[in-house]
Amino acid sequence: MAEFSIDRFVDRYAARTSGMSASEVRALFAVASRPEVISFAGGMPFVDGVPREEVATVAAEVLREHGATALQYGAGQGQLALRERLTMLMATEGLGADPDDVVVTTGAQQALDLLGKIFIDPGDTIAVEAPTYVGALGAFGAYQPRYLHVEVDQDGMLVEHLEEALFRGERPKFVYTVPNFGNPSGVTMTLDRRQRLVALCREIGIPIVEDNPYGLLRFDGDPLPCLKTLDPDNVIYLGTVSKTFSPGVRVGWALGEPSVAQRLVLAKEAADLCGSNLTMLMTERWFADDARWRGVLAGLVDTYRARRIAMAEAIAEHFPADAACTDPHGGFYLWVTLPPWFDTKAMLAAAVERRVAYVPGTAFYADGRGANQMRLAFCLPTEDRIREGIARLGALLADEEHLYRSIHG
Amino acid sequence: MRVAVLAGGRTPERDVSLRSGHRVMTSLNDRGHDAWILDPGERPLVEALGERPPDVCYLALHGKEGEDGTVQRLLDLLGLPYTGTAAFECEVAFDKLLAKDALRRAGVSTPDWVAIEGWALRDLGGGAALGRAVERVGLPCVVKPSRSGSALGVGFVDREADIAPAVMAALSFSGAAVIESMIHGTEIAASFVGSPLDPLPLVEIAPKAGRYDYAARYTAGATEYFAPARLEGGVEGAAVGEAARAANGLHLRDLTRVDLIVDRAGLPWVLEVNVSPGMTETSLLPMAAAASGMTMADVCDRILHAARDRT
């Protein structure tokens, strides 16, 4: 008799891999990425809005003028010229920064992983919004924390809930938040809540990780100060060019106290030695032309605004009246809450069958909540496709409701 | 032989199918055949077959379209021979609503079940009868979409209150749901190849988390397998016999995998039959073949010849 183990190393893996398993949702996403499916699932930036010829010119210039550097290893912290450029980018959001405190990472996603590596011991508590960014749950999850979910409403994180938890004795290692046009919620934390959050965390001595990928994608209204601006000492700020330029260059960064920056550099060097000099130089040069990047960004914002309007209008027309939807003023996402009996994970197969896809809400919680919620990304499909996709989804919701009523009388 | 290996498609099992297909193609080429992958999800099937006509189509598609008779009917129309079961029998085997009935008519032991169609729930007030379903099959029970593969949409129900959500979830994958008594015991896969169908050694499936659900099937290491299965001689013979009765009763051809549970009394129960079982490096049929000393090339060649010799 032979014992077949599909994985000969199965008894060797670290305990932290226990959550890494195959899922039906992943299998369905493989179909959802096919062209006939209108996908509201992935938060893919509209890269066609970035003029390719100009990027090609930038790439050619970089290779011609700095070829030896571009093709070589670099410093773990990232090139100084780029870090200076990134401080300029942060200044456009009113955030003052010293390039020495900036650590360039492989997208802000790597910064999440590195923060997990330097802050989280197994069993530590991390406070995250409810719902929160699925990629943060994944990145931190490898370090085996326990999550403390803090509810979100239309004004962002409910700081009083965090306060109550702290009063109960909870002591998270840090608080993670996406304050501008959150992923997945789309909501923005009000100034009042920002002030209360930084005051509370400063008082108790809990650092805040402020993840700000979407801040510059504002459709209307005035920008609010970064948490890092309100409390430069106690906030670790994460930025990225994925949404303002390209996710393909994989340039993100962390801005923290020198002590944090130093540990991040060491962790970064241990992980991958350094980022790509080629794409760092391209990014530096892209943002060196102020009129160009601002012009391209303005075009992207116009596109996203139009798509968000198209999606919100289509939802108003096609979704059931008791579906609640957030009202984002920027970013990529709308967050939909359906009546409690909906199961968006179970419904995804039927959605894909109808050639439309979304991300089921449970992905954005660590505790199984969100079964009646879904994230809809409006960033990539055209307005016509958005209207068509929402109509398909609306018809499905109506059918599901009919089925539910038939079963439950 | 010139062999178009049909793999991929548009179902959630697309990736598994492509892995099956590549393995089959490589094995056939090793045997000197001229085999290539044809992915109906990438380009129109009829056009592709017209451009490069094969002697035989090897069907490595999984899930709807590939296993429910759709592709088989199209190939019948084109007059192209293909591996595996004929169209009508595929339709019966793939749809649990029909297959369960066909198994019982063939005298095969299969767990007690009831079936309910989505439209009966929606338009005929069938929801009121769901409680009756639980009375019939008892708890715990298993709710399955009638037409779906790879355990997609399958729900395990322990409490009566969970039956309605499980049925709704199953109906997301298919137009009807089958609610089946849960049999506790050892999960067994019985594979057959060739013409007439020849049994391969039984494979015993031991999911570490207890249930052989989607994650247990497709997460490497989540399940242990034993081939041949650790069954006593009499029990093993009964399981092979029951599986063969199922395969023959449903008129399956060339290759099939019959999934069973052997209960604690040693009695075999057929859960379902598969007309296009997985052929990946982690699939059950290749595991059974390896336990019998056959290579993948032996297996694929035998299946291919069974199809060719029919024409």
Image (cartoon, rainbow, N blue to C red):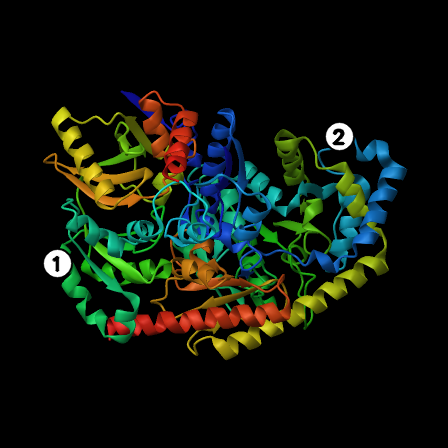
Q: Which residue is mark 2?
A: A73
What's the distance in space between the residues labelled 1 and 2, CA to CA? 69 Å
Dot in front, 1 or 2: 1
Q: Nearer the viewer, residue B242 or A351?
A: B242
Q: Residue furthest left?
A: B265
Q: Nearer the viewer, residue A53 or B252?
A: B252
Counting from the top left corner in percent of width and height, residue A291 is at: 85, 60
Q: Secondary structure at mark 2?
A: loop
The crowd level at tag 1 (other Cα within 10 Å; few <14, some 14-19, many 20+) is: some
Counting from the top left corner in percent of width and height, residue A369 is at: 39, 58
The crowd level at tag 2 (other Cα within 10 Å; few <14, some 14-19, many 20+) is: some
The answer to whether residue A51 is seen in the rendering is yes
- Residue B296, labelled with which disc? none
Q: Is residue B302 placed above or below B177 in the rendered structure?
A: above
Kindly identify the amino acid type of the residue bearing the numbered disc 1: Arg
Discs 1 and 2 lie in a common subunit: no
- Residue B136, labelled with which disc? 1
The subunit letter for the residue under badge 1 reads: B
Quadrant of the rendered image containing residue B59? top left
Kindly identify the amino acid type of the residue bearing the numbered disc 2: Tyr
The subunit letter for the residue under badge 2 reads: A
Q: Secondary structure at mark 1?
A: helix
Q: Is residue B36 placed above or below A377 in the rendered structure?
A: above
The answer to whether residue A9 is seen in the rendering is no
**With B38 as the anchor, is B85 left or right in this view?**
left
Q: Nearer the viewer, residue B103 or A174?
A: B103
Q: Nearer the viewer, residue A372 or A182?
A: A372
Q: Is residue A371 placed above or below A253 in the rendered structure?
A: below
Q: Residue furthest front?
A: B311
